[in-house]
Amino acid sequence: AARAAGVRTGMTLAEARARTAGDILLAPADPRGDRRALAWLADLADRFSPAVGLDGDQGLLLDITGVAHLFRGEAGLIARAGALIRGRGFRLTAAIAPTPLAASALARAQAYTHAHAQAHPPADATVVVAHDRAGPDETRAALARLVGPLPPEMISLDGERLRRVAEGLARLGIRRVDALDALPRSSVAERFGSGLLDLLDRLYD
């Protein structure tokens, strides 16, 4: 509800109160507690993958190469993980993709969309784009179709910094990853630095 009213990370309390007409519940942030909870969830997730890592402070990354068949496929793995997470009082938003950054971006985009629509997503909202039998070109094309419509700020955990870059891109009429990807790389590097190109490369490779 706060997001729908226009409240954003980094906003002053006075502005947040103005946007919500004063109807706002305040609570202190607990970053250490959040990190402990995420680490605890990572320990639980090791039953689904031999390699579990933190996705910044926003989620988990699991390498499921070669293990999905143990759970009757990718969708079965996500269903099992969702049941485990729900049992601990959380809701899972997941994506499976050929690269960690793509999976992270797709999952964040789902969570963002549901939050702003004030909708209640299914327990295990998911996108699956990786398949054992798909060739590299087919997989990349499927991935490009999914990440192409995303706002550029979805492809980085440093949302505030990339949000400023996204505002600069929007002034040029670039509001989607596929439109950004179509720009000459030299122009992107000149205007926004090589870091943005590195993110695009990591998105697909």
Image (spheres, rainbow, N blue to C red):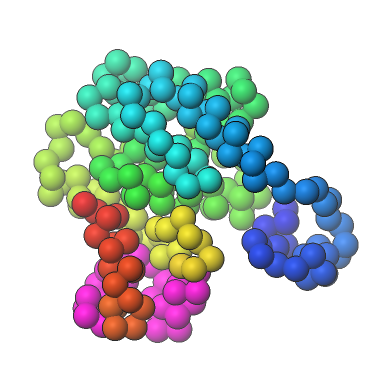
Image: magenta residue range: 163-187
Q: Residue furthest right?
A: 22
Q: Nearer the viewer, residue 104 or 122?
A: 104
| Residue 201, horizontal then vertical, whole percent | 24, 60
**Residue at (26% x, 42% y) in the render:** 98
Asked whether 182 falls inside the magenta stretch, the response is yes
Asked whether 58 falls inside the magenta stretch, the response is no
Q: Is residue 74 visible?
A: no
Judged by its main secondary structure, the magenta piece is helix
Q: Nearer the viewer, residue 115 or 47?
A: 47
Q: Residue furthest front?
A: 32
**Residue at (49% x, 22% y) in the render:** 44
Query: Relative to 164, is 159 above or below?
Result: above
Q: Answer with left or right where residue 154 lies relative to residue 188.
A: right
**Residue at (70% x, 67% y) in the render:** 11
Q: Nearer the viewer, residue 140 or 198?
A: 198
